[in-house]
Image: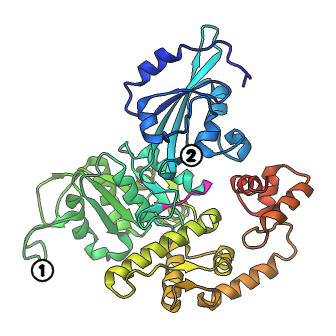
Amino acid sequence: MPDESPQAPDVDALVSYLEHDVQPMIVLDPRYRILAANTAYQRQFGVANQPHVGRKCYQVSHHYDVPCDQAGEHCPMKRAFELRGPDRVLHIHHTPRGPEHVDVELRPIFNAQREVVAYVERLSTVRSASAKPSAEGLVGRSIAFNDAISALHRVAPSMLPVLLLGESGTGKELFARALHEASERARHPFVVVDCSGITETLFESELFGYEKGAFTGAAARKPGLVETAQGGTLFLDEIGDVPLSMQVKLLRLLESGTFRRVGGIETLRADFRLVAATHKPMRDMIGDGRFRQDLYYRISAFPIHLPAVRERPDDIALLVDSILQRIGRARGAAGSTSGRKFSVTPDALARLHAYSWPGNIRELRNVLDRACLLADDGVIRVEHLPDHMMERESANRRNNSGSASLSSRGELTDRELARFAQEFSGTRGALAQHLGMSERTLYRRLKTRR
């Protein structure tokens, strides 16, 4: 990017135009300086006695002292300059309410010579996830988690079918609910169909409903789950378990948008947004005939990968804090431990970080539930964690004893990390990979040593 603006834009006229937009918007010069902001931005992101005009965008939004791309982040300004067009990214921004997920869209402004003279940045707070500990909903700050939230935020306003892919325990239903709540159908039903929990003989009647007398025991008409989801979202959890005999009927429903109750002759029109999820290898299932290829293409218009816990180690402390809040609130409501707050010792947190979590968030919740029962004073210590976690950690250490890669979790202090960085001859990205952490985490930890 050029170091200076070739020609200053008419900022006042531009801001006058932006005032009509309800979304927070700012104007930047090519050197990252904030030139102006509309009222919506000042209302949502402004801090009293802390002027933002004249400051660098990365200082205000991230508290960085270098541009985002130098801190291990995606820099939309750099990308927009390269593309000569708009760029969009989800970032964690510092706001008056604390860290929040913010969807950022940056558009370049050109002069008559087609030189970039400024940028307009539009910001939209993402309500479907929290970047700080929360007693409900999705929480996370890692790159892998943010990628999933960014995809969710992009697809939510559309009617495209979404397929959530990931291991068991990664929170597919929470993601599906967040997608529903971020869509225009949020005021209508969110209906969950557990495809693995319905027998083949009952699947059709559960999905489509039945008429009185359709079969023995059908004493009255019963609407199915498709009918219940009218106007809302139908979430087919573990769709890989749908029997082949029902896959063709499900395909017909999706292609025609119509269905009939079991035992009925009336054709009914369906009106729902489809979200499906599975932990199974769908392409392998298509190859061996267990899943229809045409149905797969229908449900997978917009696939989203949900990361396993081991893919988002930067989020473990945040997940632990959030789950403990939820456990404390649930037990307080039950009256058994009213008012008690749970915490974790640094040693126990280091063990939680070192574990690989094959059962993902579901396993983490179970481990913390058990530990809370054992922690009489509300403080979870190493001895409150399951024995198998200790055994697996010891095995991992033995297996990795000859590896060049190190894990910084609980092993390197900030001082040791700074010394290691000085001695390392490669790039910062290579150092982050070597230490088993994200480049952004490495940058933040090294920054604290300055």
Secondary structure, mark 1, is loop
Q: Which residues are magenta?
A: 139-143
Q: CA distance from mark 2 to mark 1?
A: 56 Å
| Residue 389 visible in the displayed image | yes
The number of numbered badges drawn on the structure is: 2
Which is more toward the observer, 446 or 231? Answer: 446
Does 180 sit above or below residue 65?
below
Indicate yes or no whether the magenta region holds residue 326: no
Q: Residue at x 43, y 73 (%)?
A: 326
Identify the residue at the far top of this view.
112
Q: Residue at x 43, y 45 (%)?
A: 155
- Name the residue type under label 1: Thr
Question: In front: mark 2 or mark 1?
Answer: 2
Residue identifier under label 2: 91
In the picture, measured across the screen, residue 372 lies left or right of residue 212, that is: right
The circle on residue 216 is 1
Q: Position of residue 299 (x, y in %)?
A: 41, 53
Please tell me in which quadrant of the rendered image residue 173 appears.
bottom left
Secondary structure, mark 2, is strand
State which quarter of the image contains the N terminus: top right
Please tell me in which quadrant of the rendered image residue 113 appears.
top right
Q: Position of residue 53 (x, y in %)?
A: 57, 29
Which is more toward the observer, 435 or 199? Answer: 435
Discs 2, 1 touching: Cβ within 8 Å: no
Indicate yes or no whether the magenta region holds residue 141: yes
- Name the residue type under label 2: His
